[in-house]
Image: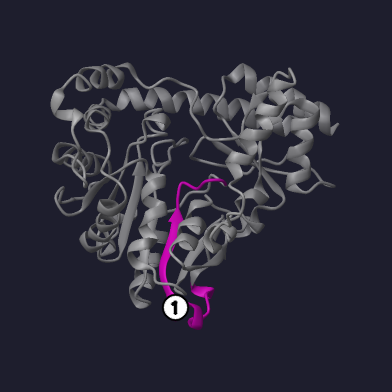
Amino acid sequence: MFEFSDRIKALPPYLFAQIDRKKKEKIAQGYDVIDLGVGDPDMPTPEPIVKAMQKAVEKPEHHRYPSYEGMYSFRKAVADWYKRRFGVDLDPEKEVIALIGSKEGIAHFPLAFVNPGDIVLCPDPAYPVYKIGTIFAGGVPYIMPLREENNFLPDFRSIPKDVLKRAKIVWVNYPNNPTSAVATKEFYKELVDWAKENNLIVASDLAYSEIYFDGYKPPSILEVEGAKEVAIEFHSLSKTYNMTGWRIGFAVGNAKLIEGLGKVKTNVDSGQFQAIQEAAITALSMPEEEVQRIRDVYWERRKTMVEALRKAGLEVVDSKATFYLWVKVPKGYTSAQFVEKLLDEKAIVCTPGSGFGEYGEGYFRISLTVPTQRLLEAAERIKSLII
């Protein structure tokens, strides 16, 4: 009787929704499922943030409609954090906007700058929302392969000129989900120069900037001279402060790009609950030691799981950031086949690399979002499957 729109028909099934459904089926059958699928931190939100929220939610002024672009105090806290963390100066009024989680901003951004038929350059494998937001805007995703031999960085200078003439936006995401690859300021400098040459918007997803190890500290693209002329950067408090369920993020950068995103948001949402923004100010003002404590937990889990998987005979891609491991599938399986076998026979949820795009084939992703002992148990189950 009712038929979905063409844009809905064009969408691939949303990967994480499918995984969640299969996991629930396995749990209902009575299995002890170890979920290493979705990147959802298992640690609680730090207590100072929770207490700030408890106080803020009692304030009557927060019970009314929030501002569309976010409270000035929140945007000022974002600007102050960027200055401390990256040395980047931002105007809280024009170069910062609050988001209902960075996913919302990433999905809405193409609506402001992409016309039907315009091309958006999307990495592959990648977070699915870059392509999905493009499709919703009537744009055409053009795939930039991320290959291991190129350290999972796009070779953007190989993109044909006829594609570039129609292109509006190029998406990048470092530290990277799903590959855990990282980028340097030199890479960003080359990207900014190339974007200027081709009149392109650079959209940088920096959600994992605070989960890093081994002496590496991820840069922001906005640290590069001239980046603010072409770039917008999306960020989230979800991973840094264990706040995935709070749905609070922000975008920063070029004032025109922020304005465009703001125009979309004023027409489709009414802003984020101000009590959450107030709690987020506390998060952004927290001592670095609190973030380091969270980082240390992931470092220990990563070290333990990498050692266990390599002892089991699996190839794990070296990483210096994120709480993901990007692992090569054993010979004889596709990504989907191996992950399905893990769930069916060992009650372990992982994510097939092919779910992030065709160039993710041959890999699967593990999220380090369960305690170390459960990771070791998962490694033993995986080992028993492949021996």
Instruction: Please rate how many residues cluster around mark 1, counting C-alpha atoms within 10 Å: few if below 14, some from 14 to 19, many from 20.
Output: some
Q: Amino acid at mark 1?
A: Arg
Badge 1 marks a residue whose secondary structure is helix
Residue 26 in magenta stretch: no
What percent of the width, then of the height, locates residue 39? 52, 35
Q: Residue furthest front?
A: 1
Q: Is residue 359 above or below residue 115?
A: above
Residue drawn where x is 20% and y is 28% of the image: 63
Question: In this orientation, which residue lies closer to the viewer: 39 or 382?
Answer: 39
Residue depicted at x 48% and y 66%: 121
Q: Is residue 361 above or below residue 340?
A: below
Q: Visible in this render: residue 308?
A: no
In this view, the residue in front, 51 or 145, is 51
Q: Quadrant of residue 329?
A: top right
Measuring from the top left, give residue 200's x and y in whole percent.
Answer: 37, 71
Q: Which residues are magenta?
A: 157-178
Total labels: the figure holds 1
Q: Which residue: 75% across, 23% down?
A: 380
Q: Is residue 133 above or below residue 370?
A: below
Q: Residue at x 64, y 49 (%)?
A: 355
Q: Is residue 32 visible?
A: yes
Expressed as whole percent of the image width and height from the top left, the position of residue 110 reads 39, 61
What residue is shown with label 1? 166
Tell me, yes or no, whether the highlighted magenta stretch contains residue 162.
Answer: yes
Q: Quadrant of residue 275?
A: top left
Q: Nearer the viewer, residue 300 or 254?
A: 254
Q: Which image quarter holds the C terminus?
A: top right
